[in-house]
Image (spheres, rainbow, N blue to C red):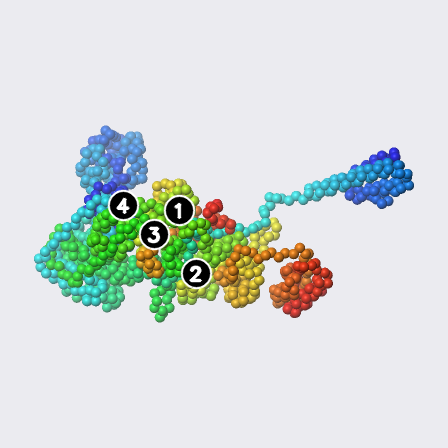
Amino acid sequence: MKFTLSWLKDHLDTTATLDEILYALTDLGMEVEDVTDRTAKLAPFTLAKVLHAEQHPDADKLRVCRVLTDEGEKQIVCGAPNARAGITVVLCKPGDYVPGIDVTLGVGKIRGVESHGMMASERELELSDEHNGIIELPSGEVGEKFVDWLAQNRPELVDPMIHIKITPNRPDALGVRGLARDLAARGLGTLKALDIPAIKGGFPSPIAVQIAPELKVRGCPLFAGRLIRGVKNGPSPAWLQARLTAIGLRPISALVDITNFFTFALNRPLHVFDAAKVHGPLRIHPAKGGEELLALDGKTYALQPGMMVISDDNGPESLAGIMGGEVSGCTEATTDVFLESAYWDPITIASTGRALKINSDARYRFERGVDPAFTLPGLELATQMILDLCGGEPSEIALDGAVPDVSRAYRLDPARVISLVGMDIPEAEQRRTLESLGFTLNGDMATPPTWRPDILGEADLVEEVARVASLTKLVGKPLRRTQPGVPKPILTPLQSREKSARRTLAALGYNECVTYSFIDAEAATLFGGGADAVRVDNPISSEMTHLRPDLLPGLLRAAARNQARGFADLALCEIGPAFQGGEPGEQHLQATGLLVGHSAPRDPFGSRRPVDVFDAKADAEAVLAALGAPARTQITRKVAAWWHPGRSGVIGLGPNTLATFGEVHPRILAAMGVKGPAVAFTILVANVPMPKVKTPTRPALAISDLQAVERDFAFVVDKGVEALTAINAAQGADKALIESVRLFDQFTGDKAEAQMGAGKKSIALTVRLQPTDKTLTEAEIEAVSARIIEKVTKATGGTLRG
Amino acid sequence: MDGLDTLKAKYLTAVSTAADESALEEVRVAALGKKGEISAMMATLGKMDPEARKSAGASLNALKDEIDAALRARKQGLADAALDERLRTEWLDVTLPGRPRRMGTIHPVSQVMEELTAIFADMGFAVAEGPQVESDWYNFDALNIPPEHPARQEHDTFFMHRAPGDNRPPHVLRTHTSPVQIRAMMDKGAPIRVIAPGRVYRMDMDQTHTPMFHQVEGLAIDRDISMANLKWVLEEFCRAFFEVDKVELRFRASHFPFTEPSAEVDIRYSNVGGQLRIGEGDKWMEILGSGMVHPKVLAAAGVDPNEWQGFAFGMGIDRIAMLKYGIPDLRAFFESDLRWLRHYGFAALDLPDLPGGLSR
């Protein structure tokens, strides 16, 4: 919403300064976005008179002038063709900043002649683009401030333009008068009276109006208009053009400018038809669908069934409440005008406007809600203005429907206002505030004014009182603690886990990323997603069409981008939601890590090696441990399709998957544009079982002072045998005595097969025996060893390596 | 026993001139070995009379101890010399780099969420969560934004695909964290104090907007909570979060469908050489929207508005992270540029807490 200060003062009698008004507007909830005020920039300049002008001795196009200023006579060199004795000019003195040329003046010497300032053109003062000569003023005294002269003679040039943001609940503030009313309520002056003329029509309106019955119920409760014949349409007067130009509207003709003026002055959009182009009565009805209308914006719109339209015998002439039609629009040649003032249902206007994608000042206001009770007064006022500016003879009002009854009342509870706002606002002040905003108070019941459709309950009364009282004055009051003493922890177990996973990953050297929740269709499909249920209907780009089924594709894309920037070795992670479906709640928390390239940069110690599946596994296990997963889990190979089938595994507890780790499938890497090697893991954070009993107490520590014994065993097994089979078998040989079993070597490949037979490999275990009641004898150790060998060879089908 | 002095001189000379450990050992064997010269003389003591034995024994023992001590000292000396010689050869270029170690980082959004949590936890706020795909009802209707409300258009909502034949209104990607208010109240009732940080989505992408960003919602409902309490909570939060002694907030009346009265909150700051300083200067910057929860919202969440009242606020997490840590560009938050992650990220053990301070 834009307006000028003088426009505001049409409605507000005030002595407040511009700054006071701006502050109050923002504080009242109408945030000032921008102010254009020329007076500050023009403040230094004064009027002066050229006493004498003569040719510059050394330059054809320059003149040396003697100029009478408030500081006496000065010599000024000037290049303007109109610089001559006797004219009144605008003087810029040395030290002044001249906005149009972005220069702070000094005393200059132009071709050897001193010049003490300059005489400005309109362009140099940013008043217009005029630069054919210096400003010549028809009046004014030497020494008078230029801004004062402008205020007297060309006020529109020093009328500050104010641009404010209006929240959607305040349609009344989309008219200057609404703003004036708020400011008056705040105490910044008084609202001027608005006299509504009662215009007597001299003849019945030749154009009748009819609202379709279904629209009277909802859509268009009231439609009024009148013909004014014999008008003379042409350019509107300068003051009106200045108003519209100041707020960025292009003056068109008096009739059109008047409708625009009412839109912004009084939030009363109107429409003018050229009556000569209207055939038969105007009917307000729902479109059948398929009709076309060339609107005033020059575009043709195809109407959908049910859209409200105003038609005459020739068909649709206007998109009701949104935009008029080109065919029946007014031109300079219009002599008979039909002036429309109607009340349109906000919801109907909003849905039609949205469907046709038309943004007009009328739609903007009708869909927020204009004052229904002002429909007819607005018509009378606008008629008066047409008569004043264009002459003509008004008809009686043609009308269908009735002003909708929007009366309602809510209880004002002054104590509740104080309790909610936390500010001591006396009851009398609360009542005064509401009354000054146009509310009618009857006992404790407040009836909102017809221009405030947003007031729909007691809470709205509180807001009105609070904002007029000024929330800036609110003084903070401590919020009572919920309980005395030390606060309890507030994170849920899953929230704590998320934090642990994140911190552990960072400690393991991963850089945490936050990537978009939506990814491209190709990536989503590769990772088991991409279904319609997780598709965004109105994506912002083709890169962001589907909710991510997994965090890995986002990290792979990030890896590819970093590789393109020359970073080959990456450790990226993300902790966030993945979406298994498109219903609320069909999301789960993943913690995903991705290692790409090498374990380390090249260094003198040979640390560098390609990352491999066991890096990913170790990190996955470290995160799982941090989340409290049990140490003993199962590893299976039932992995999803985006993992390397031979080099990946699932860490699980029975049917419950805790994590997947492994190499990313080479085909996936190629599709995502990542240069391998790349290994990754995905942890399903919520699947890690929560401890059954939560207690900080640790189980008792059982340690023995007796000497532990370690024995190594090597077995020859088929190369497909998994190490875990052997480890579990060894572990089972004596659960009491065997403290741990660890694989410490494996021997595979051609050399191993040459030695041990085709298809064979060797694995070596170290078993630690921890006696608890007495030191082990050699015989006892031998007995356990024999059992270990028996168990392992039985489980693996292998033999002890000789 | 004149011979003893000769003997002593002979062996001490031999000890001091022994070039290495094996030469020294030879001296030891010659003097103190089983068949050594001094051992042989000790063997003769038995044949002496007691008087002579006593004096000769004492002298011999003294000699033996002296030679033994000399042997040990020389042995230590040789070992030291040998170690010194070895160390002289064991020079390394210690300006070589240490073994490489990866340094991980925490994303600023995560860090700031933990900072928020630490501050609000101290004021009794728990952390609530909600789904990011939301039903139309939770995201809008329950928050007093009916279908035709102009505010709906201003939300730039992402809609989820709706299968043909499924006539429910399409689900949305939540446009704000406010639906978590509804879920938290439906779940826990009143009184309640929660914050709800998380991802939100708006169809907007330009210099300063990304289609996904982060918000934190705050909600406090009790019997007598006022807007003045809201102001205090936000002042305390800003003071703690921005780690300054004093902050000044300005409440400006505004409008949100789900609060009444509503206020936008500005914070006082200055811009000195491109560096923002919170709490001083003469500029104001909007940092959040807030207000008293609308009675219709309380009612929609099953909380009786005649009995309970309170405030809610919503704040951009990315935005306050940018302000606090001087991060210029929002879009970079989600680009995962390694250089950015390293520069703006936080160390694994930079755990924000109130006793230790939020940032280092």
CA distance for labels 4 and 1: 27 Å
Q: Residue furthest bottom?
A: B165
Secondary structure category for the residue under label 4 = helix
Picture coordinates of residue A201, whole percent (x, y):
10, 57
Q: Residue at (45%, 56%) from the top-left corner?
A: A515
Looking at the rendered structure, the kind of residue marked 2 is: Ile
Looking at the rendered structure, the kind of residue marked 4 is: Ala
Which of the two labelled residues, at mark 4 and mark 2, occupies the earlier sequence position?
Answer: 4
Residue assigned mark 3: B224
Left/right placement of residue A178 relative to residue B213 reads: left
Q: Residue furthest left?
A: A202
Which of the two labelled residues, at mark 1 and mark 3, occupies the earlier sequence position?
Answer: 3
Secondary structure category for the residue under label 1 = helix
Which chain hosts label 4? A
Q: A220 or A432, which is in the foreground? A: A432
Q: Are marks 3 and 4 in contact (CB under 8 Å)?
A: no
Q: B9 or A605, which is in the foreground? A: B9
Looking at the rendered structure, the kind of residue marked 1 is: Glu
Which chain hosts label 1? B
Which chain hosts label 2? A
Residue assigned mark 2: A519
- Tell which tag, 4 or 1, sits nearer the viewer: 1
- Tell which tag, 3 or 4, sits nearer the viewer: 3
Q: A295 or B272, which is in the foreground? A: B272
Picture coordinates of residue A172, whole percent (x, y):
23, 53
Label 4 CA crowd tier, 10 Å (few <14, some 14–19, many 20+) = many
